[in-house]
Structure formats: structure tokens, C-alpha cells
Image (cartoon, grey):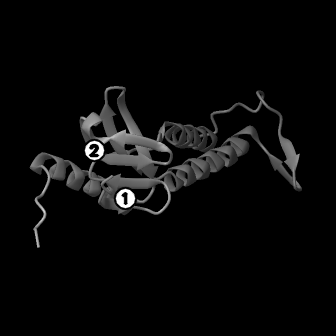
Amino acid sequence: MKTENILYTDGHDVTVTESMFQVKKKWYHLSGITKHNFMILQPDRFPSIMLLVVGTLLEIVGAAKLIPSTWLPNVYVFNVWLSANMMAIGVGILFLLMGATWIWLTKERYAVSITTAEGEKNVVISKRKEYIAQIVHALNEAFFARVAGPTKEKKR
């Protein structure tokens, strides 16, 4: 049996040879992969944007003193009387901080996407762009080697 030339391995989960692509315990024949891609996966920022919007609205409502004092009685907290408008400002600041922190912490991720007869799937996902780029580069090399055909070895 002929040993395959390993084009890339991370030593753990991913190996690319001239005819196979291994991710964890799953093997894909390159002949069965019709397309491969480098994908950027954007995080869902909708919840954090909603926190920012609600926080801003609470800030405006509280600062403009739009909450009538008859809706909520004043509350005595830490030796201070707080009106509903002051509480709206406080909760608005809290929501703004939470939304801004959430946006700051959510980063885009990167994926190796392949298309097979089963459909398209992201088989390797990472926060490290270079890692995914290395795998895609190795897949490119493997596909180019398949298109070029087997190389003739020099006889001695």
C-alpha cells in the first residue's frame, strides 16, 4: 500500500493528504468534495443591539422625567430616595454597559466550509484566522495535485 503525502496536520484533529481530508474521526474523500471555502462567521449581535436601544430609551425617558411619580412610588436604597426616573436612568446605564460589553466580547469566527453530496457544512470552526487559512491552503494544494495528476518519480 502506498503511503500518502501529508500536506497539513495540526497534530490532533485535522489532517489533509493528497486524497483525503480528516476532521476528528470523520474522513472525507477529496473526490467527494465538490467545493471548499474559507468562511467568516459573523456573531449574532441583535441581542446586544437591543440592549443598547432599550438602554438609550430608558436614559432618555429618565432624563426627560417622563415617568409620572404616580406610576411608581419612590424607593429608599442605600440612604437615598430614588424616583422612577432615576431608576430608569440607572437601569438604562446598566443595559448600555451590558450591550457594549456583549458587542466587544463577541468576535467573528472562521470556518472551513465544504460541499459534498450531503450538502454544505462547516467542518472546522475556530477563532484563529491563520489556522483556518492553513487548512484551506492545504486543501487547495491537494485539489491542484489531483487536477495535475500523479507526478512521475525519477528513476535512479
Q: Is residue 111 left or right of residue 66?
A: left
Q: Is mark 1 on a helix, strand or loop?
A: helix
Vertical position of residue 116 compared to residue 1: above or below: above
Numbered label tally? 2
In the picture of the structure, the residue carrying the numbered disc 1 is 129
Q: In this view, does 133 lie to the left or right of 99?
A: left
Packing grade of label 1 (10 A; few <14, some 14-19, many >=20) is some
Q: Which residue is drawn at 65% across and 49% down?
A: 94
Vertical position of residue 152 compared to residue 114: above or below: below
**Which amino acid, mark 1?**
Lys
Q: Nearer the viewer, mark 2 or mark 1?
A: 2
Q: In which quarter of the image is residue 30?
A: top left
Q: Is residue 126 left or right of residue 74?
A: left
Quadrant showing the C terminus: bottom left
Packing grade of label 2 (10 A; few <14, some 14-19, many >=20) is some
Q: Quadrant of residue 8?
A: bottom left
Q: Which residue is drawn at 51% across and 39% down?
A: 53
Relative image position of residue 23 (x, y in whole percent): 44, 47
Relative image position of residue 80 (x, y in whole percent): 84, 53
Q: Residue at x 33, y 52 (%)?
A: 1
Relative image position of residue 117 (x, y in whole percent): 31, 26
Dot 2 or dot 1, earlier in sequence: 2
Q: What element carries label 2?
A: strand
**Which amino acid, mark 2?**
Asn
In the picture of the structure, the residue carrying the numbered disc 2 is 37
Relative image position of residue 92 (x, y in whole percent): 63, 44
Q: In this view, does 151 lie to the left or right of 136?
A: left
The circle drawn on residue 47 is: none
Farthest residue, direction bottom: 156
122 and 151: which is toward the camera: 151
